[in-house]
Amino acid sequence: MNTFSFAPQASAPTGGHVVPNKNTPKPQGQGVQRNPIRKRHFQRPVQRPNNPVAKSATTPQISTGAPRQNRNFRPNQRRGKGGMKKGGPTSLVTRRVESPSLPLRSDDVLRVIPIGGFDETGARNCMAIEYKRDIIVIDAGLMFPEEDMPGIDYIIPDISMLRGRERDIRGIFITHAHLDHMGALPHILPRIGNPPVYSSLFTSKLIQKKHLDFPNQAKPITQEVKAGDILRLGSFEIEALHAQHSVPDAIGLVVRTPSGTVFITGDWKFDADPVHDAPTPRAHIEKLGLKGVTVMFGDSTNANVPGVTITEQTVMDSLDKIFKDTTGRIIASTTGSNVRRIQQMLALAVKHQRKVAIEGFSMRTAVEIAQELKYIEVPKGTIISSEETNNMSPSKVLIICTGAQAEEQAVLMRIVNKEHRTLEIQPGDAVIFSSSSIPGNERAIGHLKDYLARQGAEVYHNQMMDVHSSGHGKQEDLKEMLGMIKPEFFVPAYGDFYHRKVHGRLAQDVGISKEKILYPDNGQVIEVRPHDVRVTSEKYPINYIMVDGLGVGDLADVVLRDRQVLSSDGIIVVIVKMAHQNGEMLGKADIVSRGFVYMKEQKVLIDETQKKIQEILGKTKSKEQYATPPNEAYIKAKLRDDLGQFLFNKTQRRPMIIPLLIEV
Ligand SMILES: [Zn+2]
């Protein structure tokens, strides 16, 4: 995955000076139909907030939940299986599994512990490497919530096994400036004793920038690392290697100890014809292979995609053709972090004499830093504000914006929904989607394209032209890398089990024997000795550490489960008046429904429900199961159970039932 964003993608004025305004007011709507896509996407499978860090910037609330394997509150499991569980859905609470700390050991074994990124695609990448007393951490990425985690901003790696070992952590390395590798850093750093953060220049600038959103935390101690540098930290010797990727200054890492050499590729690709970037250094990689790598951890993101990643020059040529053929405005959408693509677009704008508006907060942050570091250089006056573009001939305008994943709050979606401050689609616009769809977003992207076409835009995307090249190597690239390194052991990394398995098969194709390809889970310790690497049964529990701007405390699973029930079957509030002396029900129950049924159209059901409530309470009373005055807890539980069953029989739905008893 390749997104980062540090604050809402608000449209602040562009130009020489960028003002990150997180509180840009939303424009007023015009009429009732101003947001067609959002309505249609009410049940979009994956909702990825595109500005997670900013939402909880001041006081991030962290809560923990049991890991995926232990979670049992999936709505589909509860649906359609007869009666409700005793005690209602609140009995489905799962508890977090506490992790013990990593023990101090003096043996001569190098240990690698994958902490995140081994059960999920492109998410919360993090690993710890331990030798004798020394520990280094590599990456601190975040993961976007799954569809069964409504309201959660993101999930960060569970580093609880490092508790008590803070003094032994020599540093944390960040391989590149993507959220799935660095997004959790502000949360992780204070929990591991704020060790130095080693990263390349661009990454380091972004880390410092991100810190501004967390003013109450200690400033990160950033140390710049250049490709080719060799560092000695404790008993480790660490070498940084250039990796070509969609963000500048990405690195891979070689970690050497007397017990073995570990190579972590980071995110990378091969590109015979790069634009604005140095290629991943084949010669250096070959040398590294000749020196010997005990175990390699490789990027599995594109392991199931055949062929080689197309070159950036091919992309440049396709884009150039669009620029040549288009007489209207060009609106090019990509991920905010794809500085390489933004560079290409800017170069083409200069060539074809278009002025450029850059829209989207994360994108402007990245461009600002890239300009500061002179990675992006354009003639003065090339970048203008989106307001200015409105007074120009369409043939002179390029708008580069976020939103190619159809994220709800990103610029492209706001333009289509007519919610953008200054921009609307005009007939004759060419809209380019220059990114790969993140799995789960395809449907939303399809709708977005549909609306763009309806509003008169010409849409270009990857399936019709080479307008995008992935930042990750594909099958032939992966095989080439494996062939050059020839690691003694191989651990496919950064991917769910399927992608890792496919990557493992590619390794077999280049001659690595099956027994030497390892598939550890998150939390499972890998022991490295000379010519011997094994996945052990020593395994630390890895929980979902959830960050929610609203704050949910330790009862995250209960809250999550409630949110699921509310989002799938709604809520019904039953208000019952009872006599204080004998618990007799007075009059009919009042019923309020939200998201369950539309009450005006369900009069019969509501009448029957009211009768049922009378029956339940009448029966309860006649059995004298509660004393006078009424036993509130018992009546509430009874109402939840019996009414839940009744409503399920009638509707096949399980709304959350909230009984309110009023004693008069
Ligand atoms: Zn990346």
Image (spheres, rainbow, N blue to C red):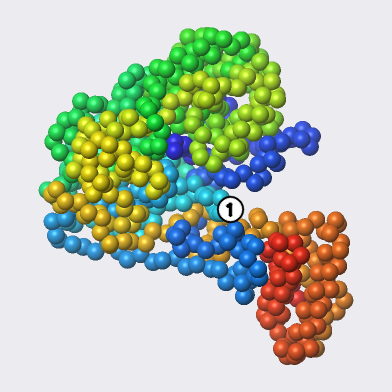
Along the horizontal axis of the image, is 465 left or right of 613? left
The one of 24 and 329 positioned closer to us in this rendering: 329
Residue 572's place in the image compared with 368, above or below, is below
As helix, strand or loop, the secondary structure at mark 1 comes to loop
Rendered view: 456 above or below 41: above
Image quadrant assignment for residue 416: top right
Residue 256 versus residue 600: which sits nearer the camera?
600
Q: Image height check: is 288 above or below 490?
A: above
Specify whether tag 1 is near ligand 1 (CB below 8 Å). Answer: no
Q: Is residue 664 visible?
A: no
Q: In the rendering, at what x and y percent does residue 563 appear?
A: 61, 58
In this rendering, the answer to whether 663 lies above or below 628 is above
Quarter that holds the N terminus: top left
Which residue does the image show at 57% across and 72% down from the upper left? Answer: 91
Task: Name the amino acid type tagged 1.
Answer: Pro
The residue positioned 64% from the left and 10% from the top of the image is 393
Q: Nearer the viewer, residue 353 or 221?
A: 353
Give the percent coordinates (x, y) of residue 627: 73, 90
Camera-nearest residue between 639 and 189: 639
Q: Is residue 557 visible from the viewing direction of this image?
A: yes
Mark 1 sits on what residue?
150
Where's residue 406, x and y in %? 58, 35
Mark 1 crowd level (few <14, some 14–19, many ≥20, 10 Å Cα)? some
**Left or right, 108 with reference to 70:** left
Quarter of the C terminus within the rendering: bottom right
Residue under the point 33% across and 57% down: 523
